[in-house]
Amino acid sequence: MTEQTFYEAIGGHDTIKAIVDRFYAGVATDEVLRPLYPEEDLAPAAHRFTMFLEQYWGGPTTYSDERGHPRLRMRHAPFAVTPLARDRWLLHFRAGLDEAGLEPDLDAQFWAYVTHAANFMLNSD
């Protein structure tokens, strides 16, 4: 018997897509974050983020297949990621996790990762 991946344990694509969709619904109207997304349509960013999270958590490797190594800090370097932007990003991601209603241990693991990642992306005061 093979061990279930985190991706499978949380419900796979549908769960990650729901979290990301809720996250971007918040970003779309956020006066701090929206300017950091140069595309008028947020759907391509949501698609990339969904692919990234799927791959990170043990799902399909579509992100790397299409875009190569994530290089998160490099890809975000052109944007001022301030503590305020980080906090707003986490606020909207938390809303997505809350709506997903994951088991507490899975939610805690997901939250720990995104909190760490958000702090890692800081590049401006």
Image (spheres, rainbow, N blue to C red):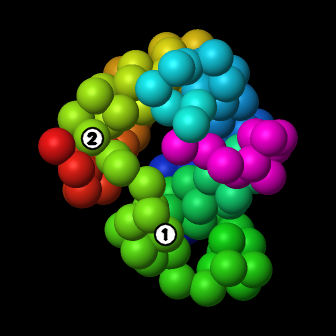
Say which quarter of the image contains residue 114: top left
* Viewport quadrant of the C terminus: top left
Q: Nearer the viewer, residue 1 or 15?
A: 15
- Look at mark 2 in the image and give the residue it sits on: 82
Which residue is located at x 39 percent, y 66 percent? Answer: 77
| C-alpha gap between disc 2 and disc 1 | 15 Å
Query: Can residue 115 be seen in the rendering of this structure?
Result: no
Q: Mark 1 packing: few (<14 Cα in 10 Å), some, or many (20+)?
A: few
Lower sequence index among marks 2 and 1? 1
- On the picture, is 42 further left or further right than 53? right
Does the stretch in magenta take in 39? yes
Q: Nearer the viewer, residue 34 or 88?
A: 34
Q: Residue furthest left?
A: 125
Say which quarter of the image contains residue 52: bottom right
Q: Mark 2 packing: few (<14 Cα in 10 Å), some, or many (20+)?
A: some
Q: Are marks 2 and 1 in contact (CB under 8 Å)?
A: no
- What amino acid is at disc 1? Arg
- On the picture, is 41 further left or further right than 106? right
Query: Disc 1 on helix, strand or loop?
Result: helix
The dominant secondary structure in magenta is loop
- Look at mark 1 in the image and give the residue it sits on: 75
Report the magenta residues as a range: 36-45
- What amino acid is at disc 2? Thr
Residue 122 x %, y %: 25, 51
Which residue is located at x 52 percent, y 20 percent? Answer: 31
Query: Can residue 30 be seen in the rendering of this structure?
Result: yes
